[in-house]
């Protein structure tokens, strides 16, 4: 058989999908298997929705579907037709931040920010039904979202502060990191081999959340970088190249 016997590739059938996102209606022509996360990012340019694991594990892609959090990486765009989608872009503006966004700033709840959109949408939905959570309840609420660099302590504080902001009972934001988190003024070596530079916040330690010390058996561990994550050595080795087709 030669290449010419295979014929021309058959164009993939597309669907005319109407998505309502952050109050605006969009029509897109996409393959039926287009993921909602890809449609938001690539077809609508709403890149605030991040994609981490693509397996429904890390929570980075969380958006709200009719107000309820869903992993956009596990849903087809076509399945979102007829529903109201809210992304992180719909939670507030630079001029008028939403309470959860403001709380993350007040509580130093992020560092690189990659996980942050998923936390913001998750917490926004949670507070709708739980307007006055305890720290323990807040910790449970964010258990489906993974953060590799902030440490969950400040995110838990941000959940509670966001609840206060929503209720109108919040004190003015403290100038310093809340909860006694230490601000270091020298380079601090981390177990990962990376360092915290002078003046960076030393994040509070949550369960398995310190850089370089994450639980190797935690969901998402298989996605870690082998250069920075010692637990990656536990992964099964890829099949050796034998030259045979698999
Ligand atoms: S990218 Fe969707 S849950 Fe991780
Ligand atoms: S702030 Fe960097 S992964 Fe969460």
Image (tube, grey):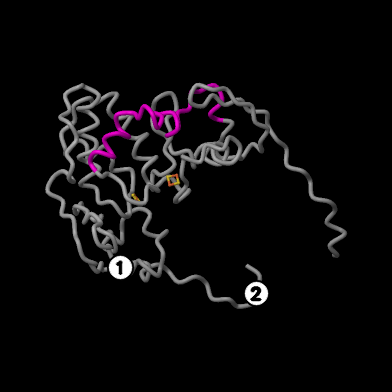
Q: Quadrant of ligand 1?
A: top left
Which quarter of the rendered picture does the C terminus lie within?
bottom right
Q: Is residue 121 above or below residue 224?
A: above
Answer few, some or many: residues within 10 Å of disc 2's Cα (few below 14, many 20 plus, some between 14 and 19): few
The residue positioned farthest toward the left in the image shown = 180
Mark identifier at residue 192 = 1
The residue positioned farthest toward the right in the image shown = 4
Q: Position of residue 38 (x, y in %)?
A: 56, 41
Nearest to the eye among marks 2 and 1: give it.
Answer: 1
Q: Position of residue 9 (x, y in %)?
A: 79, 50
The answer for how far apart the CA atoms under marks 2 and 1 are is 37 Å
Q: Is residue 69 above or below residue 201?
A: above
Which quarter of the rendered picture does the N terminus lie within?
bottom right
Q: Position of residue 29 (x, y in %)?
A: 68, 32
The residue positioned farthest toward the bottom in the image shown = 242
Residue 213: quarter of image: bottom left
Disc 2 is placed on an element classified as loop
Q: Is residue 82 magenta?
A: yes
Q: Is residue 172 magenta?
A: no
Point 24% across, 69% down: residue? 189
Q: Is residue 16 above or below residue 180?
A: above
Magenta-tinted stretch: 79-107
* Of the pair 129 and 182, the residue shown nearer to us: 182
Mark identifier at residue 83 = none
Label 2 belongs to which residue?
Answer: 244
Which of disc 1 and disc 2 is earlier in sequence?
Answer: 1
Q: Is residue 64 left or right of residue 187?
A: right
Point 37% across, 34% down: residue? 121
* Of the pair 70 and 48, the residue shown nearer to us: 48
Point 25% across, 43% down: residue? 155
Q: Is residue 2 above or below residue 86?
A: below
Answer few, some or many: residues within 10 Å of disc 1's Cα (few below 14, many 20 plus, some between 14 and 19): some
């Amino acid at each position: 058989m030669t290449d010419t016997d295979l014929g021309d590739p058959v164009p993939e059938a597309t669907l005319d999908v109407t998505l309502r996102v952050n109050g605006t209606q969009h029509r897109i022509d996409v393959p039926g298997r287009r993921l909602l996360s890809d449609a938001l990012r690539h077809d609508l340019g709403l890149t605030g929705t991040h994609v981490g694991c693509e397996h429904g594990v890390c929570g980075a892609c969380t958006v709200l579907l009719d107000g309820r959090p869903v992993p956009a990486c596990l849903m087809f765009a076509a399945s979102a037709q007829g529903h109201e989608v809210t992304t992180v872009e719909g939670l507030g503006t630079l001029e008028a931040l939403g309470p959860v966004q403001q709380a993350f700033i007040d509580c130093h709840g992020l560092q690189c920010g990659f996980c942050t959109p998923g936390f913001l949408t998750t917490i926004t939905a949670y507070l709708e039904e739980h307007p006055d959570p305890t720290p323990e309840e807040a910790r449970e609420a964010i258990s489906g979202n993974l953060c590799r660099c902030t440490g969950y302590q400040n995110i838990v504080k941000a959940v509670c502060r966001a609840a206060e902001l929503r209720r109108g009972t919040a004190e003015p934001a403290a100038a310093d990191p809340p909860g006694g988190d230490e601000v270091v003024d020298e380079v601090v070596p981390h177990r990962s081999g990376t360092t915290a530079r002078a003046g960076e916040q030393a994040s509070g330690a949550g369960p398995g959340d310190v850089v370089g010390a994450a639980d190797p058996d935690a969901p998402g561990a298989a996605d870690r970088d082998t250069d920075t994550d010692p637990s990656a050595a536990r992964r099964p080795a890829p099949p050796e190249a034998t030259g045979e087709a698999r």
